[in-house]
Amino acid sequence: MAPIKKYSPEQMGWAIDAVRRGSNINDAAQRFNVPRATLHNKITGKSPKECSMGPSTVLSKTEEDILEVWIKDMADKHIPVTKDTLLDSVQSIIIEKKQNTPFTKNRPGKKWYSAFLKRHPEIAERTAQNLCKARDNVTEDEIEKWFSEVESDLKKRGLSQVLEHPERIFNTDESAFFLNPKPGRVLAKTGQKFVYSCSGDEKKNLTVLITGNAAGNLAPTMVVYDYARIPPAISATYPKDWGIGRSESGWMCSGTFYEYVTNVFNPWLIKENIEKPVLLFLDGHSSHLTLHLANFCSRNGIEVVALNPHSTHIMQPMDVAVFRPLKLSWREEVRTWKMQNLGQVLEKHDFAPVFKTGLEKITVATIKNGFRASGLYPFGPEYVNMSKTEELRNNKKRKIKEKIPFTITSPAWLAYSTKKEEEKKKLLKEKELRVIQREEKKNEKANNKKTNVKKQRNNIKSTETEILHLQSDESVTSDALELDDGPLSTLFPSPMKVTHGSYVIVLYEGQHFPGIVNNVNNNEYEVSTMTFSSGKSYKWPEKPDKTWYRKEQVVEVIKPPILLNKRGFYSVKEMEKYSDYTY
C-alpha cells in the first residue's frame, strides 16, 4: 500500500495552476508535494478539483459553513453556542433530512465534535463570562469619545506628558476573595460519585483593593474587614506597608477608600520617589468619587480620572488582566494551606500571609499587559479590545442625562460637585417645606373636624332642651286637665330601678348608646356600652368600653338586646326613638 501523503487544498490548487501555465505534471507534483496521480486525475477531470481527504462528512460543506456562520453570529450577539446546543442542532438537521447516520439516535458524539473543530479552525472553545445589560450596550463611539475628552482635558492642564511615563499611570480596583474558594476538579477513587472538601462557610469573603501602575509595579494592598476595631491577632499578620480597612458591611466605602489614598497610597508614592503628578484611573463607584478625596488628591499631585461608565471590563487593567490569575493563584495557595493544616478551615486571621504568597506570583508582564489591553498605556482607543463590546441596533446610543467630567481632580469636576451639593441642599429644603405644609394642612383638617363636632353637639343639646321644655309644658297642661280624674300614682311615676346586670341606654356627649351595668356606686353606674354597626344593629366591641355615668345620664332601662346572627350583631328596639342622635 502506497504511503499516504499529507497536503493541503492550497498546495493542490497551486500545482493545478502550475500545470495550466505549462509545467509538467511530475515537476508540479514534486514541487508542491502533492500526489502525481491525484494531480493527473484533477487535471483530466476524473476527480473534482475540490474534495476533502478521507471519508465524506455527514453534513455537506455548505451545511457546515452555515453552522460556522451561525456560531460566530451568536457569539457576536453575546449568546454563545455550547457544545450540546451544536450537537442538538446537527441532530435536528439530520432528522429533518431523514438521513442515515452511524450516530446513536442521529446525535453526533465526541469524535464528530472534535473533527468539526479541526475542519473549522476559526472556531474554538472558550469560557464565557456573564455580562450585564448595561455593559453589553457600551458602544465603540462612547469609548473613543472618553479617550478624546480625557486627552483634551489633560492637554489643557499641561498633564499630557504624564501619559508617556508608565510608572506614573495607576489603576486601582477592589474584588471579593472567598476564604474557602471552590477547589475545582480533584482526584478521587474511581466510581465515587460524591467527593467533598472541608470548606467551612462558603460565603465568607474579604474585600481586597489592588493598585498597580503601567510599569508593572504593585502598590501596597488594602483588605477591608467588617469590624469596628481590628483584633490584634489579625493586624499582627499583615505586612507593615499594607492597609487594613474597616466598614460595617465589609465592603469598600468612601471613608475607607479615602483612608487608603491618604495613609497608604500617597506615602508609598513619596517613599518610592515617584514623580508627581500621577494619574489614578478608577471606576466611577460612589465610594471613589467624593469631594474630600478630590480636594486631597488635587493638593498632593494625584490626578483621579474616572473610567467610562459600564466599560471597566475592557478598560480597567485589574479587571482585564490581574484579578483572574490572582484568584486562580489564591485558590492554589488555599489548597496548599489546607494540605499543610489538615482538618482546619482558613479563617480571617490566616488571610494575609496566604494572600501575600498568591499575590507575589503575579508577574510584571501580566500587569503591563493589562494596561496595554485597556488602552491606558500606550494611551488610545485603538489598543482596547473592542470585541467585548456590542453596539446598539441602528447605532442608537444610551441617553446620557447629564455630562459628568471624567477627571475628578479638574476644576470642572469640582464645579460640578459644588453644583450637585447645592442642588442636593435645595432639594432637602424643598422636602422640609413640603413636610411643613403637609403638617399644616393636617392640623387645619383636624381643627375643622373638631369645630364641626362641637357645632353638632351644640345643636343636639339645644334640640334636647327644646324637647324637654315641650314635654314639661305638655305634662303641666295634662296634669291640670286630668288632676281630678286620675289616681296620684299616674301623675308621679315610680323612679327607675337600675341594678347590676341591667340593660340601659346612656347619654354620652349628646349621643345615646345601649349597654349593660357592670357596677353600681350610690348614684353612679359603670356601664359597658355597645357600638353602632350597620343598619339598625349594634355589637359589643372587642375591647370593653367601660365608663362611669351619673344617674341623670342613664336615660332608661331596656330589655336585653336580641341576637340577630352568629357574627355578633344585636337589635335594640328601644334605640329606634333615639336614632336621630346615633346616625
Image (cartoon, rainbow, N blue to C red):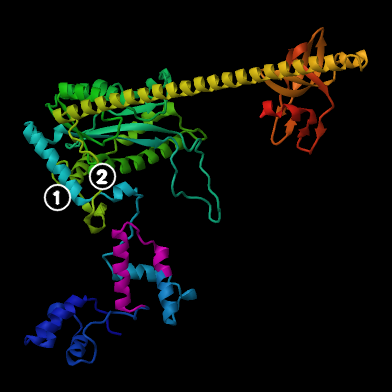
The amino acid sitting under disc 2 is Ser
Q: Label 1 amino acid?
A: Glu
Note whether residue 66 is visible: yes
How busy is the neighbourhood of tag 1: few (under 14 within 10 Å), some, or many (20 plus)?
A: few
Q: Is residue 121 or residue 485 the one in the foreground?
A: 485
Horizontal side of 403 relative to 356 (left or right) equals left
Q: In the rendered image, which residue does mark 2 sit on?
A: 311
Give the residues drawn in magenta, as a range. Answer: 59-88
Above or below: residue 243 compared with residue 108 = above
Quarter of image, res 93: bottom left
In the picture, the disc for residue 545 is: none
Q: Residue at x 31, y 47 (%)?
A: 134
In the image, 325 versus 400, the foreground residue is: 400
Q: Quadrant of the C terminus?
A: top right
Instruction: Indicate whether residue 457 is drawn in magenta.
Output: no
Is 457 drawn above or below residue 212 in the view shown?
above
Q: Is residue 64 magenta?
A: yes
In the picture, measured across the screen, residue 236 lies left or right of residue 153, that is right
**Magenta stretch: dominant SS?**
helix
Residue 113 location in percent, x, y?
A: 38, 68
Residue at the farthest top position: 522
Is residue 536 depicted above or below 2 in this figure?
Answer: above
> On the image, numbered disc 1 is attached to which residue?
382
Q: Are marks 2 and 1 in contact (CB under 8 Å)?
A: no
Q: Nearer the viewer, residue 155 or 261?
A: 155
